[in-house]
Amino acid sequence: MGQDVFARGLAGLDWAVVAAYALVVIGLGLWAGRKQASGTDFFLASRDSSWPVIGLSLLASNISSATLIGLAGAAYANGIAVYNYEWMASVILVFFCIFFLPFIIRAQVYTMPEFLERRFSRGTRAYFSGLTIFLSVFVDKAATLYGGALMLSLIFPGVPLWQMIMALAVLAGIYTIIGGLKAVLYTEVLQAVILLGAAVVLSIAAFDAVGGWHRIVESVPAYKLSLIRPMNDASVPWTGLITGVPILGFYFWCTNQFMVQRVLSARNLDHGRWGSLFAGLLKLPVLWLMVLPGTCAILLYPALKTPDLVYPTLMFDLLPTGLLGLVVAGFLAAIMSATASTFNSAATLFTMDFARHWNPDLDGKRLVLTGRLATCVFLAIAVVIAPQIERFGSVWQYLQGALSYTAPPIVAVFLIGLFWPRANARGAAAAIIAGLVIGIGMFFAINVTGSLQIHFLHVAPILLAASALAMVIGSLSAPPPPPEKTEGLLWNRGFFDAETAALAGTPLWANYRVLAIALLVATAVIVWRFA
C-alpha cells in the first residue's frame, strides 16, 4: 500500500471543492485589495489589523506546503522530534511580545531592516534586507512551490514539474500583485481555517486507520515518540534543541519580514501582542494535526520511497471523495498563503529598503507600482529555482540547513543591539562580516569537502557566538553610538516597570503577560508529556 494510491485521482466532487476554493480565495483577495492608494495601504494593510487576523495570518504564512510535507516526512523518517521547532515557536513568540515587539511597533517602520538602520547604519539595513529577500525567494518559497508541485505531480503525473510550479505561482501572484498585504491577510484568514479543518480531517483518518494511539505506542519505537533526543541524534539532538532551534526560531519569528510584517500591520501594540500569542497557541496542536499523522504512516506505509511522499499518500489513501477535495484545498491554501505572503514581504523589502533609497521622491502610487513589479520578478525567480530542490534530499533538510548558516549573525545583531547600549554600527558590521565568512567556511567544510562533521543545529550556536564576539570587539573599538541610535530602541528595566504600572488595571483576560504565562504552561505540559 502507498505507492499506487495516487492512481485514484480526484473525483468530480473533489474537483468542485478545489475549484470553489480557488475562486473564492482569488475573489476575496481582489476584493480586499481593490483600493491601494499608498505604501502603507499596500505594504502594511493600512496598519489596522486586529489580533485574530494577525494570529491566523501568522499560522497560514508559517504552515506552507513545505511545512506540511516536511513535518509529516520528518516524523516518518526520524520521529516526532521535529515538533520541537513548533512548540519552541510559542516560547519565542512570548519573548518577542515582552522584549521586542513594543519597540518595532512604536518605531512605525515598514520593514525589520529599517529598524536596524535606526539602531545601527544604512549598510546593516541593506545587508539584512538583501539576505532576507534571498532566503525568502531562493530558499523558503522555492521550497514551498516545489512541495506543492510534488503533490500535484501525483494527481497529474504527465505534467512536467516546472509547469505545475508556474501554475501555483501565478494563482498566488494574481491577488498578491493587485491587492498587497490587505489581500494577503484577508485570504490567509480563510486559508488558515481551511488548513486547520483539513488537518483535523486527515489526522482523524490517520489515527483511525492505524488503530488509535495505543497501537502507535505499542508498535512504533519509543525513541520516535520522544521529543528529547541524544546528542548524536541525526534529527534534533538535545544540544541542538536548546541552542540551534531557539536561534533559528528567533530569526524566523522575530526578525524575518515574511512573518513580522503581519504584526507591523497591527492597529496598536495590544493587538500585535494578542495576535502573536494567538499564533503561538495555534502552533501547539500541530503535534496531533501534522506530526503524528506522519508517525501513523510508519505503520501504514513502511516502504515509501521518500519521506516527502508521506502527507500526499495519507491524503489519497485514507480520505473519501469530497473530503479529499477539502484536504487538497487545504494543501493549496498552505501553498498560496505562504507564497503570497512571502512575495509581498520581499516586494516590501525591495521597495522600501532599496527603491525608495535610490529614489526618495517615489510617491504612494509609484511605490505601489514598484512593489507590484518586484512581486512579479520574485515570482519568476522562485519558479526557476524551485525544480532544483529535489537535489537536496528532503524539503525540511533544505529549509533548516540553509537558515543555520545564514541567520545567526543577524540574530546576534538584533539581540545585542536590543539589550546593550554600547553596541554600534562598527560592531554590527563586524558581526555580519565574521558570521558570513565563518558561515561560508563551515558550509564548504561540512557540505562540500566533508572535512567537518557537525549537525546543522550545532552550526547555528557556533556562528552566533563568533558573531557576538566580533560585535562586542567591534563596538568597543569605536565610540559609543549617538543618543538617536539608542533612544526608544533599547529594552531596560525602566521600560518594564513603566509597563507594569500601565497594566495594573487591565483585566486578566486582556493582560498579555497573563496570556503569555498560560501559553508557556500549556507548552511545558506538552513537552513534559512527550519528553
Image: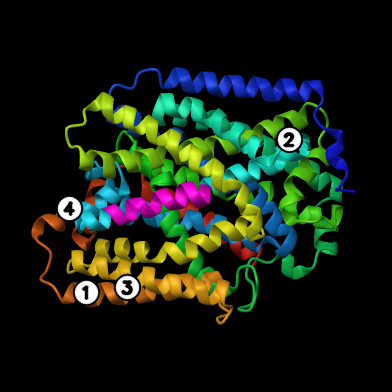
Give the structural element (helix, strand or loop) at label 4: loop
**Residue 370: x and y, percent?**
32, 32
Question: The residue under label 1 is which amino acid type?
Answer: Gly
Q: Which mark is residue 159?
A: 2
Which is closer to the viewer, label 2 or label 3? 2
Question: The residue under label 2 is which amino acid type?
Answer: Val
Give the magenta part as a residue range: 126-140
**Residue 282: x and y, percent?**
54, 44
Q: Is residue 45 visible?
A: no
Residue identified by numbered label 4: 488
Cα separation, mark 1 vs mark 4, equals 23 Å
Q: Which mark is residue 424?
A: none
Q: Which mark is residue 468?
A: 3
Q: Which mark is residue 474?
A: 1
Of the image marks 1 and 3, the number of the one nearer the N terminus: 3
Cα separation, mark 1 vs mark 2, equals 54 Å
Residue at position x 48%, y 75% from top?
A: 442
Of the image marks 4 and 2, the number of the one nearer the N terminus: 2
Q: Residue 132: say if magenta.
A: yes
Of the image marks 4 and 3, the number of the one nearer the N terminus: 3
Q: Main secondary structure of the magenta part?
A: helix
Looking at the image, residue 97 sits to the left or right of residue 105; the answer is right
Which is closer to the viewer, label 1 or label 3? 1
Q: Is residue 223 above or below residue 496?
A: below
